[in-house]
Image (spheres, grey):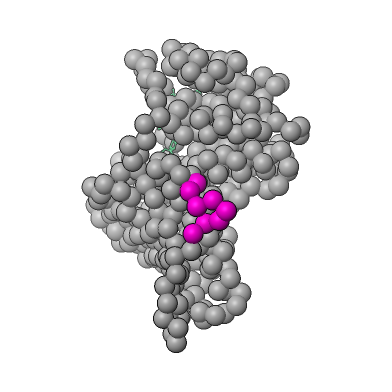
Amino acid sequence: MGETLRLGYVGCGFMAQKVHIPNFASIRECRLVALAEVRRKLGHKVQARFGIPRLYPDHEALLGDPEVDAVAVSADWAIQGEIARDALLAGKHVFMEKPMAISVSQAMGIVEAARRSNRQLMVGYMKRYDAGNELAKAEIDAFRASGELGPITFARNHGFCGDWVAGLDAPMDTTDEPYPRTPARGPDWLPAEFLPRYLQYLQQYTHNINLLRWLLDAGDRVGVRAVDLDDDGYTGVVVLDMAGVRAVLESGSLSHYRWDEHTQVYFRDGWVKAWAPPLLLRQVPAEVEVYRAGSQQSFTRPIPRPQAWTWSYRREAEHFVRCVLTGEPVRSSGEDTLTDVRLFEEIYRAYLRGRGVL
Ligand SMILES: NC(=O)c1ccc[n+]([C@@H]2O[C@H](COP(=O)([O-])OP(=O)(O)OC[C@H]3O[C@@H](n4cnc5c(N)ncnc54)[C@H](O)[C@@H]3O)[C@@H](O)[C@H]2O)c1
């Protein structure tokens, strides 16, 4: 690769306009050379606003552009994985929004395409690039290595959500063109009436499980121990085993003006805790607390360095550009997120078995 990544963007809806296109456009080593959008009028507006040289009517047309080295895609849950797969098979590196896939069989096809084409596939788990979460992970790793706080005894992520947009005032072009609906095909075993609930739960909490797995270095050594969800298939508690650590996910909704999410890793003699910011609140990383119990009894609030104020989505975009240009492997690969896709099938299987549906 040269010194500049030539990026083609597919799908210029909400996340593209508010987050990803402005972020990629602001990175010196990245040049936005093409845009694909099936809603043509919308595509023209966004192309003009960001000064993107070429506009294509869909992702397939963009993939034929030899000047596109890499593709970024944010589209419907049901279709973005297929777009990513096509892009990989066309020889492009891919940054894609989460979830990568809505079933294990779909996920396998995407990961296989990345393997075959030998191109990078990064899934947009921006929480792994949040400077506060990076700091929390560094603290956890250091305590594990030193043994200072004893062994890890428990982990939890509490995620009741709230106002994730947080007043982000980035301009947004709209259109009266019809939205391209793609029918979602979930796991074969999932009864059709549960698909909407499954997708809602998956698309929200895939972030939280992905973050916990990373903080605990659990990789694929993760299984489901217990599931207790309400009729809505969303509110409740899931108990996981993450590399021998009991990890609990608390899910639900709250009309909170901020974002009600925190992640806590307990050791025998203390904890490391991170409070997530509202997702689109620019330049605000997670807040971190380190508690030393035992004979010390102290709280510290470490601040990310060298920059205290950064935005996870901007840092994930920088990471993708750097990894493609240098060949360094990405931190949130398609291969890694196969585990998340598998876990969501397992959680919903257990949920529906518990209700006598399966
Ligand atoms: N990481 C996060 O925090 C976060 C937050 C919100 C949404 N998301 C994810 O982002 C994704 C996109 O969400 P959104 O709200 O931006 O969607 P959106 O519906 O606003 O935009 C998707 C766009 O893709 C276009 N499109 C569909 N098929 C296409 C094709 N084949 N070629 C070209 N364009 C095509 C549509 O016309 C639409 O304009 C979702 O999958 C969602 O899970 C992630």
Q: Check the image and name the residue furthest to the right.
A: 2
Our reading of the magenta stretch's main secondary structure is: loop
Instruction: State the residue in front, 320 or 90.
Output: 320
Residue drawn at the location 45% of the way across and 77% of the way down? 292
Asked whether residue 239 appears in the rendered view, the answer is yes
On screen, residue 231 above or below 54: below
Figure quadrant of residue 327: top right
Instruction: State the residue in front, 150 or 249.
Output: 150
**Left or right: 192 with respect to 340?**
left
Q: Quadrant of ligand 1?
A: top left
Asked whether residue 92 appears in the rendered view, the answer is no
Figure quadrant of residue 282: top left
**Left or right: 188 with respect to 71?**
left
Residue 304 on the magenta segment: yes
List x then y, in percent, for residue 162: 29, 47
Residue 179 on the magenta segment: no
Residue drawn at the location 51% of the way across and 17% of the way down? 47
Instruction: State the residue in front, 100 or 263.
Output: 263
**Left or right: 95 with respect to 229?**
right
Instruction: State the residue in front, 84 or 19.
Output: 19
List x then y, in percent, for residue 29: 66, 33
Figure quadrant of residue 184: top left
| Residue numbers of the magenta segment | 303-310
Instruction: Identify the image quadrant of the N terminus.
Output: top right
